[in-house]
Image (cartoon, coloured by chain):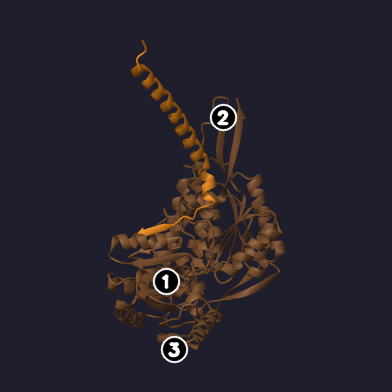
Chain colours: A brown, B orange
Amino acid sequence: MNPTAQEWALRAAGVRLPSAMLIGGRPHDAAAHWALTSPRDGAELVVLPDADEADVDLAVRRARQAFDSGPWPTLAPKERKRVLHALADAVEAHREELALLVSLEMGKPVGDALLIELRTTVDTYRWYAEWADKLTGETPEVGPDALALVTREPVGVVGVVVPWNFPMTLAAWKIAPALAVGCTVVVKPSEQSPLSALRLAELATEAGLPDGVLNVVTGNGPRAGRALGRHPGVDTIAFTGSTEVGAAFLGYAAESNLKRVWLELGGKSPNIVLPDADLDLAASTAAWGVYFNQGQMCTAPSRLIVHRDVHGELLDRITARLASIRIGDPLDPATEMGPLVSAAHREHVESHIALAQAQGARLTFGGDRPDSLPGAYLRPAVFDDVEPGTALSREEVFGPVLAVHPIDNVEQAVAMANDSEYGLAAGVWTRDLATAHRVSRRLRAGTVWVNCYEEGGLSVPFGGYKRSGNGRDKSVHALEKYTELKTTWVQL
Amino acid sequence: MRRPLIAIPARISATASALRHHADMTTRALAQAVHALEKYTELKTTWVAL
């Protein structure tokens, strides 16, 4: 039986909040600290170590040692598989505790944390656990006098830098494949969501991961993140976050050891609705895309490109749905939309709303603060007739703000969809199969959803074109990021 | 007296053999180029709700 709001609140009052970094299998403190507050009510949760360059250096040296001399990279693949399954079991066994930590630290409704974030996290560790003993090399035919072996080897020490919007899932998308192939990892979670990462590292140790294989440093991006990005002992950075910080990591790599840098960055994803679409489903999905995770999604369908024939009807349905959602305490399982991650982020989103209004966009719904809620809450905002080229049509808000663009035909829809510096995801709604595929082919985006949004499993890759990044998370292709190809040529 | 019917299959056979050899080489080159192609392509996922 699922806990009630009252039971979640009681658990929140009693839950142990991890407060130490984990480096080399041991708790580690830092010289400086900061207080983590909850967006739920602005209350202080716990004081955490604010890692400096020396702390990051220690974590990398421990990871380096575990890679160069430790058992993990040379362990029998079936043993790595066993440990990763044990980690998945541990996460599953502690899923309610971890969902609570996620909800407290970044405000995600606890129901979503449990049913979406924790489910996908467990699935990810299990999926990549199974890959540990299924990787094979190649022996291309090169003639009678030679033998060529093409093998994949772990790339080494991986720095994982992940954001707060899906702190466990996005970390798992990088940690799980890296560990499966034998890499060692230093994780730098967002300073707004470190608790779940710290608890994960504790569980990993209990699951049998050798010391130094998974290390977690907490701190701010400009210091701890930068130190990880510039460290010569790190072979690869796997980053999810903003395009600006992703570009900074490319710079850190150029300034240090040319480490590989894999980036999953921002988006301004188009969601195209054509006149023959299932409008009920398109509307409910578009509305969900605005408020789910408080709109704090890199893939958020934040540009609704809708044919003028159905524009009014679709907008009415979206507005009706948004007006009915339950905004409130993320620890109430009935809550559909919680607070934004912080008061500062809410002000950032509100500044986008103000700019859109100043630039002539028509606010048709929301965008204000709900009465009588103490945290960083904000009602979803819908802007109609947004002029292409204005800030709201081009810039990622990372909040519950929808820009609506009416169009007259498919050509216009595709042109508008592709008129973006981003290329992370897109949606197409039509009952015509040929139109769906023709439009999908022309969209410059890493994922296209047809008659749905945010669907998918571990078997399909995820990542972006253009300024949305490079490389792919999930699927077998993610393994490529954490391995080097080696050619061994033997003359016979 | 030589009959062309014998020579023609021989020529065809030689040509076919060369074609097969070329095909083998092309296949090998393509297989070896797979990893190089990864650098010049984007992976796109299309997920269709049914």
Choose the circle earlier in sequence order: 3 or 2. Answer: 2
Q: Element under label 1?
A: loop
Pointer 3 local density, CA inside 10 Å: few below 14, some 14–19, many at least 20: few
Is residue A456 visible to us here? no
Q: Are marks 1 and 2 in contact (CB under 8 Å)?
A: no
Alpha carbon distance from label 1 to label 3: 29 Å
> Which residue sits at x=54%, y=27%?
A143
The residue tagged 3 is A372
Q: Residue at x 29, y 80 (%)?
A: A313
Disc on the earlier residue, 1 or 3: 1
Looking at the rendered structure, the kind of residue marked 1 is Pro
What residue is disc 1 on?
A301
Picture quadrant of residue A456 = bottom left
Q: Is residue A21 visible?
A: yes
Instruction: Report the Cα–Cα distance between label 3 and label 2.
Output: 73 Å
Chain letter of the residue carrying label 3: A
Residue mark closest to the camera, 3 vs 2: 2
- Residue that mark 2 sits on: A147
Please name the residue shown 60% across and 33% down the image.
A489
Dot 3: what SS?
Answer: loop
Could you say where residue B19 lies in the image, as x and y percent from the top left? 44, 30
Of labels 1 and 2, earlier in sequence is 2
- SS for tag 2? strand
Amino acid type, label 2: Leu
**Could you say where residue A225 lies in the image, as x and y percent from the top left?**
64, 65
Q: Is residue A47 above or below residue A471?
A: below
Residue A193 % position (x, y): 54, 69
Q: Is residue A64 left or right of residue B3?
A: right
Crowding around mark 1 (Cα neighbors within 10 Å: few <14, some 14 to 19, many 20+) is many
Q: CA distance from mark 1 to mark 2?
A: 51 Å
